[in-house]
Image (spheres, grey):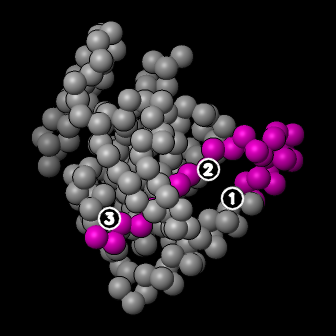
Amino acid sequence: MRTRQIKILCTACFVFLAFMGSSEPSSEPTLELVTKDIYNRPFDLNDYRGRIVVLYFTNKNYASQRSPKYSSQAAYYAFDKNLQFVLIFSPKGIPKIGRGTFRKKLTARIKQEEQKFKEHVEQEGKDPSGIIFSRYLTDWGLSIHKLFTINSNEEKFSIAILDQDGILRGHFPGEKNYDKAVQLVEELLKSMN
């Protein structure tokens, strides 16, 4: 398992360095994803071309605990127009009969958290209309997990990062790789400036 993680990291670093050193367009394929979010609104990954996209793959059990790292990271990047967060929930721990209830509870919780964050931002004297909120998807058939080769049995979360051209630049399974994911996001953001 450790060898696989090292290979993934080395590949991600190599791809990133090759991207930075070349002015030619990348021949890497871009990933296509068209679906609907938890609000039943259209979601097309191509709409975020020009931004770095950070995809968090998680599940009901971990979402109920709420990651303090994710909360602080989402707040830190909340006004960065070069970045879009997308949370993708697997069906793990959710019986088919309970999926509608899960979605309703999740949308209510998200609306509540977003409202609290807006109020916090206003108290700091900032304009909440500039917040770039995360998008939320459910992946009942695991087709999105398969597209990004994510293990749906990951206990906590996995992160996949796309660059501004829509090309996958890194896959970071689990909390132990969280800091590496943040480092790649920072490197990609710097390359845009």
In this rendering, position of residue 109 left or right of residue 165:
right
Amino acid at the residue labelled 1: Glu
For the record, the magenta segment spans 116-141
Mark 1 touches mark 2? (CB < 8 Å)? yes
The earlier-in-sequence mark between 1 and 3 is: 1
- Which is more foreground, mark 1 or mark 3? 1
Instruction: Residue at 42% x, 72% y: name it.
Output: 61
Residue 165 percent across, percent down from the top left: 38, 29
The earlier-in-sequence mark between 2 and 3 is: 2
Q: CA distance from mark 1 to mark 2?
A: 8 Å
Residue 186 percent across, percent down from the top left: 47, 28
As for residue 6 lying within the magenta part, the answer is no
Reading the image, the residue beneath label 2 is 133
Mark 2, secondary structure of its residue:
loop
- Which image quadrant is residue 22 in? top left
For mark 3, does the 10 Å Cα neighbourhood hold few (<14), some (14 to 19), or many (20 or more) residues? Answer: some
Amino acid at the residue labelled 2: Phe
Reading the image, the residue beneath label 3 is 155
Q: Is residue 176 visible?
A: no
In this rendering, position of residue 38 left or right of residue 166:
right
* Residue toward you, 186 or 108: 108
- Which is more foreground, mark 2 or mark 3? 2
Residue 124 percent across, percent down from the top left: 84, 42
Q: CA distance from mark 1 to mark 3?
A: 26 Å
Reading the image, the residue beneath label 1 is 114
As for residue 128 lying within the magenta part, the answer is yes
Q: Looking at the picture, does residue 51 appear above or below residue 56?
A: above
